[in-house]
Structures are given as structure tokens and as C-alpha cells.
Image (cartoon, rainbow, N blue to C red):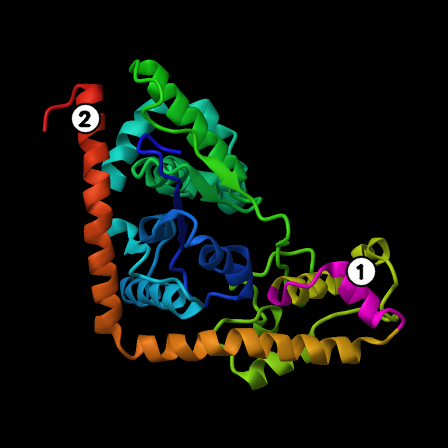
Amino acid sequence: MNESGTKVVLSGVQPTGDLHIGNYLGAIKKFVKIQSEFDCFFCVVDLHAITVFQDPKVLKKNTLEVAATYLASGIDPNKNIIFNQSSVPCHAELAWILNCVCRVGWLNRMTQFKDKAGKDKENASTGLYIYPNLMAADILIYKATHVPVGSDQKQHLELTRDIAQKFNNDFGCEDFFPLPEPMIDNEISRIMSLKDASKKMSKSEPSDFSRIILTDTADQIRAKIKKAKTADVPMPDTDQEVTKLKEVSNLINIYSSLSDTPRDKIINLYQGKNFSDFKNDLTDILIKNITPIGNEMGKLMNDQSYLVEILKQGSLKAYEKAKKTINEVYDIVGLIR
């Protein structure tokens, strides 16, 4: 709990377009589940998005699309704060101060920068390198106590805890920033490509058949699952054997996450059978769960003034919370404003 005794959650989604079921199952579905248990800040992290160049017009559209996805998935804007990161300048203000607290050696250990920058890291943006400090600021500006994270962000949350601890120690303000706890849903597995389960589902893959987009129609979903890789053998009878078949295991994870059915129950249901029945049932589950979200997103995107107003109202609420923290930080650090 934070100083007021409240459990606070901060999480966000980058507005990079074409959100897919990996984004939904890995993050947004979880947001819907926890929204009644915590004070929640759900952010569209547009400042993080521009660590890689974005077309300005597309960025604006994608920002509204993430807001639409939040709403269409069931997040209540009257009970939660939905906003875009750049509209609350306290994020960037705190990020600079945390840049001065964080050590270069800590950032050099961040594996995600190495993965994203690749071999040409000298040409990567500075923003991509210090991205974890902005993420720390996103969390700490609201004194969040819990952060939903996947395996690819866990290291960044550990860094946030280190930065918070160092700030508290450096300035003699014990417990000013809480050390946020990760919220890891062990029941939700990482969703991989439908074409190659050794790769994470991503919009950057060349083939549209590698992923199911939240706005896909029933016919598109049906075609993609029909072409999804499985195996040349019948469904095994143990989870241990299924795990060896990466593509099959990935489809079972999708089935399990959407239907809240344990993996072993699914395996028992289809063991010894070829994959046609399994694929047909998985298709039905996807259509039932995903197409209503896509349809609602379409309606919301046709009323962009409503989405802008949701973000504006959320930003005002977020700013009221954030400005209290940044004023306290300025005073602690010795800055005059």
C-alpha cells in the first residue's frame, strides 16, 4: 500500500497500431480483471512509442485506438483513470530527475535495449536507451504499489525498485517512493506467432497470418486458425508431450487464456484426435471473445471526439495526482518552482 493505505496500479500499452490477441491476453484482459480491486491508472504510453520514429498522424490514430481498446474490452472510465502519457508533463519531469539518480551501469544491463537496438546500437535513439527511466517515472509519479508485467518488462520493474530505493536513500526520505510489486499472472502464457511459435506474436512479422488482430472479422479469424501450424501427429495425452510441439502448445495457451480452461483439461478433451476439431472449437472461442471487442472498437473509432474527451478527462484526473508527487520531489531535491 502507498502512504494513503491504497493499492495503486499503473500500466500502459504502446500506441503502435494493430493490437493483437497477445496484447489483449497478456495485458488488457488482466486490466479488466483487476479494475475493481485497485485504484487503476491505465495509460497510453505515447512517449515510449516515439523512442522509434512514428508518423505523427498515425501516432494520433493509434493513441485513440488504444483508448478504444481499453473501453471496448470493458475498462470503465468512471472507475479508472484512462489517459495518454504525454498529456501529463509530470512524467517527463520526474523522468529527468530519475535519469540523474539511475546509474549508467544499471541501464547497460537492460536486455530489452540490446534486443531492440540490435547490432546497430550506436544509431539507436537516446530515448530507447533511457526508456526504462521514463517507465520508472510513469510508475513512481503515482506512487503505484503494483504493476502488471510480462517477462519482457520484469527487468525494468526491478530497475524501478532500485531507482526508488536509491532516491529514498540519497535524499533521506525513507518510504517516499514505494517499491512497486510485480503482478504476474501465471495462468496467462506468452502468446507466440501462429506461423512460428519460437517468436513472440508481433505486428512486425511479414505475414498477417502470424497474428490475430483485435479488429479481425470472423472470416479472417477462421482463415488464420485454419492455416495456423500444428503437428503431423494426433493431440498427445500429456502436457509434457504437448510442450514439445511449440505451435500446438501456443494454440492451447490461446484456448486456455480465452476460455479460462486449464491446459490439462483441453488436452484430455482432444487427446488422440487430429487437430481439425480442436481448431474449429478454438476458432469459435476466438470469434465469441474477440469479434465483439473489434466491433465495439469500430464504433468508438467512428466517434473520435468521445475518445478525445475520455483521454482529456483522464489526463486531468491523472495530473491532479501527479502534480502533488512532483511538487514533493522538487522540494526534496531542492529545486525551486
| Residue 260 sits in quarter | bottom right
- SS class, disc 1: loop
Residue 127: x percent and y percent? 35, 41
| Residue 96 sits in quarter | top left
- SS class, disc 2: helix
Q: Residue furthest left?
A: 337
What residue lies at 70% left-to-right and 66% top-to-bottom?
251
Residue 307: x percent and y percent? 26, 68
Instruction: Tell me: residue 120, above or below residue 177.
Output: below
Q: Which mark is residue 245?
A: 1
Q: Main secondary structure of the magenta part?
A: helix
Q: Is residue 308 left or right of residue 187?
A: left
Q: Which mark is residue 330?
A: 2
Quadrant where the image shows the N terminus: top left
Within 10 angstroms of label 2, few (less than 14), some, or many (20 or more) residues? some
Instruction: Tell me: residue 41, above or below residue 332.
Output: below
Is residue 259 shown in magenta?
yes
Quadrant where the image shows the C terminus: top left
What residue lies at 40% left-to-right and 44% top-to-bottom?
9
Q: Count the marks: how many?
A: 2
Residue closest to the eye, 80 or 245? 80
Q: Amino acid at mark 2?
A: Tyr
First-in-chain label (1 vs 2): 1
Asked if labels 2 and 1 touch by Cβ distance under 8 angstroms, the answer is no
In this orientation, does residue 333 appear? yes
Q: Amino acid at mark 1?
A: Leu
In this orientation, does residue 89 appear? no
Q: Is residue 284 left or right of residue 304?
A: right
Q: Is residue 43 left or right of residue 317?
A: right
Q: Residue furthest bottom?
A: 219
Residue 113: x percent and y percent? 49, 40
**Magenta span covers which residues?**
258-272
